[in-house]
Image (cartoon, rainbow, N blue to C red):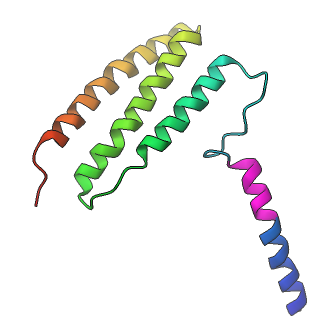
Amino acid sequence: MPRLALAFAASLALATPAFAQGQHQGHGAPRAAANEPASTREFRDANTRMHRDMDIRFTGHTDRDFAAAMIPHHQGAIEMARIQLRHGRDPEMRKLAEEIIRAQEAEIAQLRAFLARPAPR
């Protein structure tokens, strides 16, 4: 019985990296295909940039950390909405993209204003 458990554990250890590599390239995004649409490449790039920029140095001040991490998150939403406007055709989705841009820009301004205030001690 211990050999079976050891063999099972070893098979998991060997299989997990291969599975993770195939399924979790950049938070679940598969590798880019040579013939993928321009919008897909743009979405992939925006997503990568957003996640990179959200990787902030945390300060221990929850409110400030939240504001600092949300700015790139909202910027990512704006970038995706602009991709939608460049490539999308559905009127409902285009309208939503325009609304997202307006709302996220306003929230980014609010977050930046908060961060401009002196930090609590």
Instruction: From the image, give the main secondary structure of the stretch colored magenta.
Output: helix
Figure quadrant of the C terminus: bottom left
Residue 32, magenta (yes or no): no
Residue 16, magenta (yes or no): yes
Q: Quadrant of residue 1?
A: bottom right
Q: Residue at x 23, y 50 (%)?
A: 64
Give residue 55's position: percent from left, percent from top.
Answer: 43, 49
In-front residue for pair 98/17: 17
Q: Quadrant of residue 47?
A: top right
Q: Residue at x 73, y 48 (%)?
A: 23
Quick check: 9 above or below 110?
Answer: below
In-front residue for pair 118/73: 118
Q: Is residue 32 left or right of residue 15?
A: left
Give residue 106's position: percent from left, percent from top.
Answer: 26, 25
Q: Residue at x 73, y 38 (%)?
A: 31
Q: Is residue 93 left or right of residue 74?
A: right
Quick check: 64 above or below 29?
Answer: below
Q: Which residues are magenta?
A: 15-24
Give residue 80's position: percent from left, percent from top.
Answer: 50, 24
Q: Residue at x 44, y 29 (%)?
A: 77
Give residue 89's position: percent from left, percent from top.
Answer: 59, 7
Q: Quadrant of residue 58?
A: bottom left
Q: Is residue 64 left or right of residue 58?
A: left
